[in-house]
Image (tube, rainbow, N blue to C red):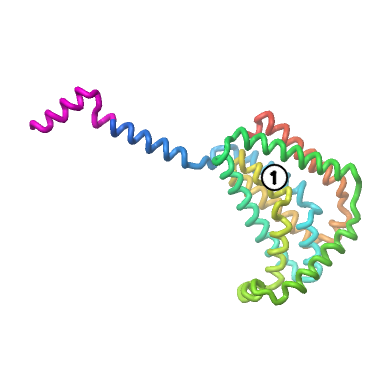
Amino acid sequence: MASNGFLSMSNSSSGFSVESMASQSLATDVAAANAWSFDWHLTKNPWEGLTSSFFMILATELGDETFIIAAVMSMRHPKFVVLSGALGALYFMTVLSAFLGVVLPNLISQERVTQCATILYTFFGLRLMYVGARGEEDKDEEFEEVENTLKDSASKGQKSYVRRMFSQFCTPVFLEALMLTFLAEWGDRSQIATISLAAHQNPLAVILGAIVGHSICTGLAVFGGEFLGKRIPQRYVAFGGGCLFILFAILNFLGVLQ
């Protein structure tokens, strides 16, 4: 009793209580937890993220290098094997890009992310519009270049350790389609655009829209790639894609996509 009285007297005389210590400690713990918790943007409108990523993939992937790789490989190998390998790489890259888009705003300020996204959208838009205005590229030469690249990679990697190890679980054609598509997609404008969209949109919706877009583009490449790749008016596709990126830049600058 005496000790309790002593503690209560000392606490009251100093103006400091056990309850205040506990509340301050709890507030500190909550603040620390909020500082390290990630905002996954899951409460944002999923329809905007889905449609934006879907049309972005269509605008950037039709006639792109990954499109031509899938088209050329499907002419010499089983189509479904090539399709599964290419889509496996594109799906993995999409999830990785969306994850990076979620992480970046939690490491740097949202305002800085918005500024970077607007600059990237503007750059890609102007570049695609320039490509479209410059005129059509020689698709025959581009197909031949990809064919030569595939032949060189096949001859150099025929006896590589990675190829021998993974060939025990997957066919060489599947691995070739997966690795070549992954390398072609790494650092591509569609990957960077996916990162930018996931930074301020619902990432699950961005992933879903991008997956649907990749499935359509790669399916067209595998089952009709040679015909479409040489006959799609690339200047119109590029110019339309550039306008779409410029629209993204304007909406992002105005805060509509936030």
Q: Identify the secondary structure beneath mark 1.
A: helix
Residue at numbered disc 1: 193
Residue found 65% across the figure and 39% down from its top: 48
**Residue 187 falls inside the magenta stretch:** no
Is 24 left, or right, of 101 in this rendering?
Answer: left
For badge 1, the amino acid type reads Ala
Is 166 situated left or right of 13 in this image? right
Above or below: residue 36 compared with residue 255 = below
| Left or right side of 20 for 196 | right
Q: Is residue 220 left or right of residue 178?
A: right
Residue 148 is situated, as x and y percent measured from the top left of the image, at 83, 67
Q: Specify the quadrant of the image occupied by residue 70.
A: bottom right
Tell which of 228 and 22 is nearer to you. Answer: 22
Whether 15 is among the magenta residues is yes
Residue 218 rendering spot, x and y as whole percentages: 74, 57
Q: Is residue 210 above or below residue 220?
A: above
Quarter of the picture holding the C terminus: top right
Q: Residue at x 71, y 55 (%)?
A: 185
> Residue at 63% of width from left, 45% of height from top?
206
The quarter holding residue 102 reads: top right
Q: Which residues are magenta?
A: 1-20
| Rendering coords of residue 86 (x, y %) | 70, 61
Q: Quadrant of residue 142?
A: bottom right
Predominant SS of the magenta segment:
helix
In the foreground, 234 or 141: 141
Q: Residues within 10 Å of mark 1 (few under 14, many from 20)?
A: many
Q: Is 23 above or below relative to 195?
A: above
Q: Residue furthest left?
A: 1
Of 197 and 20, nearer the camera is 20
Q: Nearer the viewer, residue 95 or 18?
A: 18
Residue beneath the point at 19% across and 22% down: 13
